[in-house]
Every structure is written in structure tokens, then in C-alpha cells.
Amino acid sequence: MPVRITRFSGLTKQKKLELLTYAASFVLFSLVGGVILVVIVVAAFSIDLPNPNTLLTRETELSTRILANDGTPIYEVFGEKNRSLVKLDEVSPYVIYATLSTEDSEFYQHTGYSFRGMLRAMKNTVTGSGLQGGSTITQQVVKNALLSQERTLSRKIKEAILSLQLENKYTKDEIMQMYLNETPYGGQNYGVLTASKAYFDKHPKDLTVAEAAFLAGLPQRPSVYSPYGTHPELSKERQVEVLRRMTEDGYITKQQAEEAKNKELTYRTKQNEVGFKAPHFVLYVKQKLIEQFGDKLVEQGGLKVTTTLDYKLHEESQKVVKDEVSKLKNYKVGNAAAVVLDPKNGQILAMVGSKDYFADSEPENCSEGESCVFEANVNATLSLRQPGSATKPITYSAALQKGYTASTVLVDVKTEFPGGDQPAYIPVNYDGQFRGPVQVRYALGNSYNIPAVKTLALTGVKNVMELGYRMGLSTWEPTTENINNAGLSLTLGGREVRLLDLTSAFGVLANSGVKQDPVSILKVSDAKDKTLYEYRQSDGTRIFEEGIAFIISNILSDNGARSAAFGTNSVLNISGKTVSVKTGTTDEKKDNWTIGYTPSVVVGVWVGNNNNAVKNPAIASGITGASPIWQKIMIAALKGKDDEKPEAPGGTEPSSASSVYQRQKVCKNNPHRLAQDGEDAEDRDVIVLSENDPTGADKWQEGVDKWVLTAPDGRFVGATKGCSGIPGFSDAGSSGGVISISNVNNGANVPRIFDVLANTNSSNGVKKVTWPAHV
């Protein structure tokens, strides 16, 4: 059955009038109801709203404090004492233009809320582009000055009400003035007047386009865009973005933007004021806080942060670094850094990132990041540098895991390591000398390079790199690329490390093989003293057995084992204390290290130049440079502590090399060579030196055979047999005479006039020796 539909046009006039009346009444009552509801909501939320009448004279107090472990304030903000108000007509128009372009380009058109701005913010969030957020300048004044930072519906309603009240009560210029006085510009700098003086040491009315663009870009993420932070390059990127927007909005020309972009900003030399102590450590802690709690809470949350810093020890360490670097001027040394850790828990007790955070970069007018030998604000404890020999203990730790002992014999001779398509790798010792057979104890103690490279080759680059990575060297991740790039130079500094990481890695040795990650924060409380975070010590991660840590520590504390290289009374010794210590210097003398420890403290020191400039060659490994700094800091750290000797764990027994003397048949024409059957030979007690080349090229034994020919001890022989055709010896006639030099090694540097001590040997006796010299 068809359905009849009554059309409006088919209704009578009276029916039409009734329907229109009902509709109008519904709309009217809905509007009235909506208005009443809005009035009720506004009235309800207006009961406890802050009074906006005080905004023009209100001063915000910043209460975030960072403390040392004894409660000493090391980063303290003064609130009203460190903040001043400024009138809008006392501010450069470029600051206002930059602020409008950055924060709210429609500020002088909207009534407190910008629906277009909110849509734009949503789009920017999705696309990851754009400069402005969704909040208007009016809303930001409300949030910064009157409300908390919580993200709730009730706060958003209050924000809307207060924004309307502000727009009705104050002029746009007055609101802009409030914004410029309330906004955080990083650290303790609240308001444009404080920020202008802090960064540029000038009044805001005198700011240039470039300076105004920099300041206007700070408020959204002040810690990230700070020129004093861990990534100062981001502040430049932000400034360029602000200049681009100012150009688009017509406030400046393209030429002005380009000139401002290319103008290098000169920041005020920071003064060492109360409330900014241990600056490199403070900024390190601040970055950790931001990673955990976010920018907003760290910058404005009124946090109380207790750190691990031993303030007295840190100040002593800072003074030592500054004083000692000043003594190294003739060595072309511009900077140094130091870290002190407690290996039992990983707590950072001192962090000296440069000789003086508050000084100017050197030389004068140098380009930071390029030509400055000293950059005050760069935290060198976090910078990547080549460690030289300082990582050898990691190589030998890996070898001990494979069964090596402190008495294992390695042969220190000129050795060629095949490089495949590349030239062969031929490492040399720091003094160019070769010492033949040496035990691991003396090879590590004296930091001989060739035995270390051989140990790395036998142990495996991957295994050593993996161990270093597990010990805390973040740059030693054992990827195929990293392994190939480092190769056998890994143990001589072929992979860059950070001082903090390397000091922490040595903490594993100090802590009997257990790793504790570096810790800088003990407790974080909010403005209401509610605990947001509290440190709890973990058991750590066992990296290797106690016995391995003991053996390495015992070697590194053995003054006799290192005396051949460093003497018996070097700065590596500390009177009355047993301290394990290792030095490191790169081939080109760019980086100089000393890392030493006891079971309760680890001290790491780096000396060098920020721009990697080569130092004076007179900088000796462990003697000049890092070691004097290390010794003084270690003495301060151990003051009042008893001597702590590494304790041998159960099952760790001292070992000695088995008898190396063998009764063998040696060639009469060369007592350094084993004879084959049937050759003219005689029986002797000798030391046979034999090495297996893991590459299969037999280059190791070849190096040994050449070395024994000139060995100062005639009891050494090579493992290769055969008396005829011996390289380097005359086999003419029937004399079978042999001449060997005992006091000068092949390749050694000698003065123009020098004595030669030679040994001769002949089965028929020696009547006359003729020796042509070629110069």
C-alpha cells in the first residue's frame, strides 16, 4: 500500500504557523539553556580563579634547585632577585616582531583564542612542520602567570575564562608586555629584560634583528635551544627559522634576514655567580632531568634535585685542572677534563668538563667548533677522543678470559700483520725499541704496543670490542662496520671513546668485575616536596670473574712491572696507597690520558685541545700532561681513606712461566739458529722463541727469527731450523763467521758518533774482522 507523505507546502496556514512556532521556541529555549549552562559553568569555575588584576606588576619566582650530595646548592635560581620588569616601549620592535612571528601572528586580530591557530597547530603536529604552536600569546600569559601546567579539562576551561577576562580588561600592548615579562628564556632567565642581559649583556631596546630572533626562539624549548647546552648548533637552526617567518610576515626584508643569519652572535661571558657551580655537571644533570621529566617541568616545575656530586672534591679537581693546564702552555696544551666515580655504585663525584667554564675561548677570535684549542662550554668528558693505549687493560682482560695469565710470554719484535688489499700493519713501541720475550705483566705494565696488538689478534677484535662495549664503552658496539674500521689498531686507540665512558669501564676492574652505570641524580622532589624519583642502588652487572679484575688491577698497581718505561718514582705512584693506573697517548700527541683506581674511587683525566691540534712531542705517555693532574686529584679523593689493596679471590693463584730453557742443537755458524739433522751443530741450553701467526702468513715467526740474530742475550734462538742461507750473515768460504750487534737495534735512531758492541762467532776462530759501514 503506498505511503502518503504530508508535505509542508500542503499544510494549511494555521498548521504551518504552529510548526514554525514550535521550531522557534525550541531554538530559543536551546539558546537560552546553552547561555544559562555557560553562565553556570563560568560562574562555577570563576569562584577560585586567580585575580588577573595583578598581572602587570606580578613577578614570578623560580624555585628549581640542584644540590650537591651534601645539600650545597650548585644551581640555584633567585626568583624576584634575579628578575626585572620592562615596559613595552623599552623593548626593541624586532623583539615584538620576532615574538609575533614565532608565537602568535594573529595576536592583534583575535580576542584571546585563535581557531585558525588551533587548526594550524593540529596540522603541524601531524606533518611535523611549522613554527607556531596552538596557544595564543594571551593563553600563554595565563598559563605562565596564573595557572599550573597540568593538562586537564578544568584547567582548559579556566584558561579560556581568564583569557577572555584578560582581553576585556587589558589592551593588546599590555598583554604583550605581560608576555615578555613572564616568559621563561632558559635557566633562571625569566622575562626579556633578564634574558637580554644574561645572553647579550644589553638592554632589550638595543637588541639587533639577529639577537631578537634568537631570544624569540627560546621559550618553546629553552633547554634545547640554549647556546650553553649540549647541542648549541640547535640554537642557530632555531634562529634561522624565526628569521624566515619574520620575512614571510613582512616584518623584515630578505636582505635583513640574510644579514642577521650570517652575523655571528657574541654571547655574554658568563660570570661564576652563586647558584651556578660545577657548571658542566649541572648541565649534564639538567639534560638527564629533561630526558626523564620533560622541558616544562624542569624549567618551571620548582624541582629540588639532589645529585651525587661531592662538591668539595669537585672544586679541588677543578682547581687542579686549571692550575696544571696553565703549566702546559709551552707544550701547546689548551684544555683538560676529569671525572671521579665511585666504582661500587657508579656515582659521579666530580665532573670537570674544561679548565674553566667561565673563560673565553682560545685563541682570541677563534671559530668555536673549528679552530679553538680551548672551548669553555664544551664538556670534554662527553667528547669523543682517541684513547691511545689507555684501553689495553680491556684487551688483556679479554685474553685472560681465554686462559692467558700474567706470566704468559709474548715476543716483542718487529712484526708484520698482513692487511689483505691494504698495506701491511707494522706497529711500533713508543720508543721504537724491541725487547724480545716479555710476560703479560711487563707488557701491560710498560704499555708495549706490539705485544698488545698480538694479544688482540690472538684474542679476536670482535671479542675485545664486545667486552669493551659491555664494560661501558658506548662507541665500541661490535658491529661488522665498527670491527672492520678499528681492526688491530683498536688496542692502540683506533676507536674513539668518551672520558666518562672509559672511566666507568675502569670502574668494572675496580669493582671486581661488576659494572655499575654512571649515576648523577639521587633524588627529585616537586615544589610540594613530593618525591618524583629516588635512586636505588642495583647489584650491577657482572662482566667477568673477580680473578680477571684482580690480575689486571695487580699488574696496573705493580710499580716494578712498569719501571722500565716510567721509572721507579713517577707521578703514577701515590705514597702509602695501592693504586692501579694506566696511561695513554695517541701517536700524534693529540690526546693524553691517565685512568687510575682503587676499590673505592676511579679518576680519569684527559689532556688535549678541543680542535685536535697536535701538542708538543715532549708530552710523554703518563709523565707529562694527564698524570700530574690525575695524581693530585687521586690524592684528594683518597684523603682520609685507608690503603685498599686488590684482594685475590679464592682460586686465584700466582703463576710463573714454565722453564723456557731447552737443550737443543744449534748451528755452529750461528748460535741463534736451530740446526737441522746432519748440519754442523752443537748442543746448548737455549730459549726457543716460537709464535704462531693467527693469519697463517708466518710473519710472526719471521720477525722473531730476525730479532734473535741481534738479541743481547745469546741464549735466544728462533724456532725456524736451518744453518745455511741465514739472512744477514756471511756464509762465504769455510769460515762460517757470524757478527751480531748487541747494543743497537735495527731501525733505531743513533747520534752521528756512537759505539757499536758486536759479538763474533766462528767455528775456526776469529783473527780479523772487516766491517764496511754504509752511512
Image (cartoon, rainbow, N blue to C red):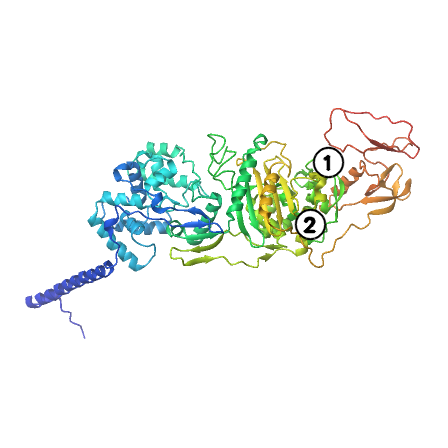
Residue 767 place in picture, x, y as percent = 92, 28
Can residue 135 be seen in the rendering of this structure? no
Q: Amino acid at mark 2?
A: Asn
Task: Please rate how many residues cluster around mark 1, counting C-alpha atoms within 10 Å: few if below 14, some from 14 to 19, many from 20.
Answer: some
Give the side of residue 325 with respect to residue 751, left or right. Answer: left
* 647 over 129 or under it: above or below: below
Residue 90 place in picture, x, y as percent = 27, 37
* Residue at 23%, 58% in the rendered image: 46
Q: Amino acid at mark 1?
A: Gln
Closer to us: 48 or 162: 48
Give the side of residue 58 with respect to residue 408, left or right. Answer: left
User: Quadrant of residue 666 in the image?
Assistant: top right
User: Quadrant of residue 265 in the image?
Assistant: top left
| Number of numbered discs overlaid on the protein picture | 2
Residue 449 place in picture, x, y as percent = 68, 41
Comes first in the chain, label 1 or label 2: 1
Instruction: Work out which residue is located at the far front of the displayed protein and give it.
Output: 640
- List the residue tagged with mark 2: 554
- List the residue tagged with mark 1: 433
Front position among marks 1 and 2: 2
Can residue 637 be seen in the rendering of this structure? yes
Look at the numbered disc 2 and give the secondary structure of its residue: helix
Q: Quadrant of the N terminus?
A: bottom left
User: Quadrant of residue 698 in the image?
Assistant: top right
Mark 1–mark 2 distance (CA, rounded to whole Å)? 26 Å
Look at the numbered disc 1 and give the secondary structure of its residue: loop
Instruction: Work out which residue is located at the far right of the displayed protein and give it.
Output: 764
Residue 465 place in picture, x, y as percent = 62, 49
